[in-house]
Image (tube, helix red, strand yellow):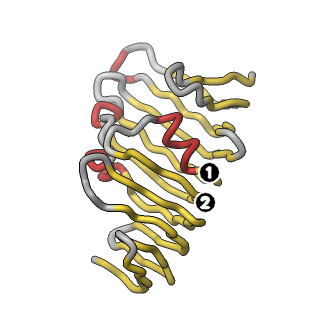
């Protein structure tokens, strides 16, 4: 069954949502949701992957998501409180896990859920609320695991051009 989720404030919507999987458990602590296939569209972009949720008391989850997204559409849908502008393209393959209890609307407080991922930025830009930093013209690749690997990532921070390459541990 295909369905949609709409942000009533911004009118942005995840559409063509398709979920396939199983639910089991008879109590909150042995509940299990295993989605073997997750697919959705966000504007012109799409995402697909897998998702599991265990124990409704702890709300432990794990997910792997592959996506090709317009970052403005992501910002409009999620409405991140710490970002005033987000645009450009992002292709990613990411694994996240943790507890849904840890989610908040603050971008920087939820980064610890990322286990690993690869990211390709296409003319992306980012402006934070209450921080006088403009990051734009972001192009290139980055990988996140136990360290961050950057492959020919170019960007501009407050009009200063930067080319980054290497690993940050």
Along the line of sight, the residue nearer the viewer: 147 or 34: 147
- Rendered position, 152 above or below 7: below
Give the SS element for disc 2: strand
- Rendered position, 9 above or below 156: above
Residue 69 numbered tag: 1
**Quarter of the figure that contains the N terminus:** top right
x then y, percent, for residue 23: 55, 23
x then y, percent, for residue 135: 40, 64
Along the line of sight, the residue nearer the viewer: 66 or 81: 81
Give the SS element for disc 1: strand
Q: Residue at x 38, y 23 (%)?
A: 30
Mark 2 crowdedness (10 Å alpha carbons): few <14, some 14-19, many ≥20: many
x then y, percent, for residue 76: 52, 37
- The residue that label 2 is drawn on is 91
**Quarter of the figure that contains the C terminus:** bottom left
Along the line of sight, the residue nearer the viewer: 48 or 22: 48
Residue 56 numbered tag: none
**Tag 1 and tag 2, C-beta contact below 8 Å:** yes
Q: Residue at x 37, y 78 (%)?
A: 160
Which badge, 1 or 2, comes first in the chain's sequence?
1
């Amino acid at each position: 069954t295909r369905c949609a989720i709409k942000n009533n404030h911004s009118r942005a919507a995840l559409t063509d949502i398709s979920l396939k999987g199983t639910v089991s458990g008879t109590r909150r602590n042995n509940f299990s949701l295993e989605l073997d296939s997750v697919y959705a569209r966000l504007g012109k972009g799409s995402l697909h992957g897998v998702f599991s949720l265990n124990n409704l008391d702890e709300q432990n989850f794990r997910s792997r998501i592959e996506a090709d997204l317009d970052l403005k559409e992501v910002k409009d849908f999620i409405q991140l409180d710490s970002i005033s502008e987000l645009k450009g393209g992002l292709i990613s393959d990411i694994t996240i896990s943790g507890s849904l209890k840890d989610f908040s609307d603050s971008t920087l407080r939820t980064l610890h859920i990322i286990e690993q991922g690869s990211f390709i930025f296409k003319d992306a830009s980012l402006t934070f609320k209450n921080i006088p930093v403009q990051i734009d013209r972001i192009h290139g690749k980055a990988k996140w695991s136990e360290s961050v690997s950057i492959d020919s990532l170019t960007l501009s921070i407050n009009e200063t051009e930067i080319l980054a390459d290497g690993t940050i541990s």
